[in-house]
């Protein structure tokens, strides 16, 4: 850009114009797909299994804006005893390395199970998920898939088992094993919110936020590979 010195960080206007260009031509997911294609072509992906999960990203709930209205594409949902207003990022993660291979963006009140078919690449032998995905093997769109469903039991059931640990030793051990596999899905979310700072939806509408998620998940995958290379070098 004119007036910029070599190696200078682009100013806010330049970055905003580039973002608008991506949004206008619906190119937000292209970098994500290209990064994943490169990873796959390089033999990085091992497709034995997929871990699925979703995280809530809150949006501004205030109506003190020009239209005096909430973002119509954001919705309210309850998690535990708390209420949240915003959107959800649903991800499918490679079970071996914790890399995001697919994702969808919805309002916060969309049930996690509704997005699961979009998060599977079709070559996995197992799918790992928390208890929010229970019943997946009975749904019309997933019941015929030839995979092992490693879905966690309800926390209340696990607590009941722990009252009689000897009797339920194997059941408890199985849940610990499921949890150890499922833990890798937290890495991309931690990177998204802590390292990239995407804790709040700063743009209105799901499309703009989907565009941002695509870029951040692509960068997150590259960062994860860099971390693995550094770790391997000791």
Image (cartoon, grey):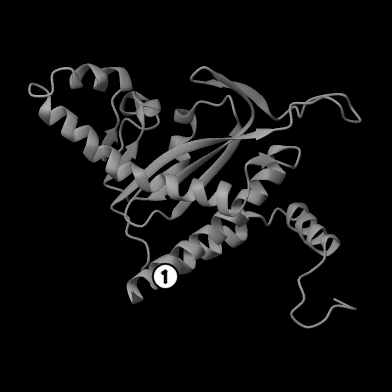
Check the image and name the residue furthest to the bottom.
Answer: 6
How many dots with numbers? 1
Q: Quadrant of residue 60?
A: top right
**Can you tell which quarter of the image residue 107 is in?**
top right
The quarter in which the C terminus is drawn is bottom left
Q: Percent position (x, y) of residue 120? A: 41, 44
x and y, in percent, of residue 30 in the image: 61, 59
User: Is residue 24 visible to the viewer in this orientation of the structure?
Assistant: yes
Of residue 138 and residue 13, the one placed in the foreground of this image is: 13
Q: Residue at x 50, y 65 (%)?
A: 222
Residue farthest left in this picture: 166
Query: Would you place residue 221 above or below residue 203 in this image?
Result: below
| Residue 7 to residue 164: above or below | below
> Within 10 Å of the Cα at label 1, are there few (<14), some (14-19), or many (20+) other Cα atoms?
few
Which residue is more in the foreground, 161 or 115?
161
Residue 131 position within the rendered picture, expressed as x and y whole percent measured from the top left: 35, 27
- Asked where in the image residue 58 lies, by quadrant, the reply is top right
Location of residue 39 in the rendering, given as x and y in whole percent from the top left corner = 44, 66
Q: Quadrant of the N terminus?
A: bottom right
Element assignment for label 1: helix
Q: Is residue 42 visible?
A: no
Q: Is residue 89 left or right of residue 212?
A: left
| Residue highlighted by disc 1 | 41
Q: Which residue is nearer to you in this view: 140 or 112?
A: 112
Residue at 76% x, 38% y is: 204
């Amino acid at each position: 850009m004119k007036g910029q010195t070599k190696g200078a960080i682009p100013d806010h206007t330049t970055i905003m114009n580039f973002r608008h260009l991506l949004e206008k031509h619906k190119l937000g997911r292209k970098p994500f797909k290209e990064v994943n294609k490169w990873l796959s072509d390089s033999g990085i992906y091992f497709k034995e299994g997929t871990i699925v999960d979703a995280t809530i990203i809150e949006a501004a709930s205030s109506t003190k804006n020009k239209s005096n209205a909430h973002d119509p594409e954001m919705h309210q949902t309850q998690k535990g005893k708390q209420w949240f207003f915003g959107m959800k990022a649903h991800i499918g993660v490679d079970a071996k390395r914790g890399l995001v291979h697919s994702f969808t963006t919805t309002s916060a009140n969309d049930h996690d199970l509704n997005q699961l078919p979009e998060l599977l690449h079709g070559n996995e032998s197992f799918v790992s998920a928390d208890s929010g995905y229970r019943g997946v093997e009975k749904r019309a769109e997933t019941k015929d898939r030839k995979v092992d469903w490693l879905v966690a039991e309800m926390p209340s059931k696990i607590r009941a088992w722990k009252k009689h640990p000897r009797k339920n030793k194997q059941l408890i051990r199985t849940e610990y094993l499921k949890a150890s596999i499922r833990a890798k899905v937290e890495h991309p979310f931690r990177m998204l919110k802590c390292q990239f700072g995407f804790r709040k939806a700063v743009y209105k509408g799901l499309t703009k936020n989907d565009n941002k998620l695509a870029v951040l998940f692509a960068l997150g995958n590259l960062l994860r590979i860099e971390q693995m290379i550094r770790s391997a070098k000791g």
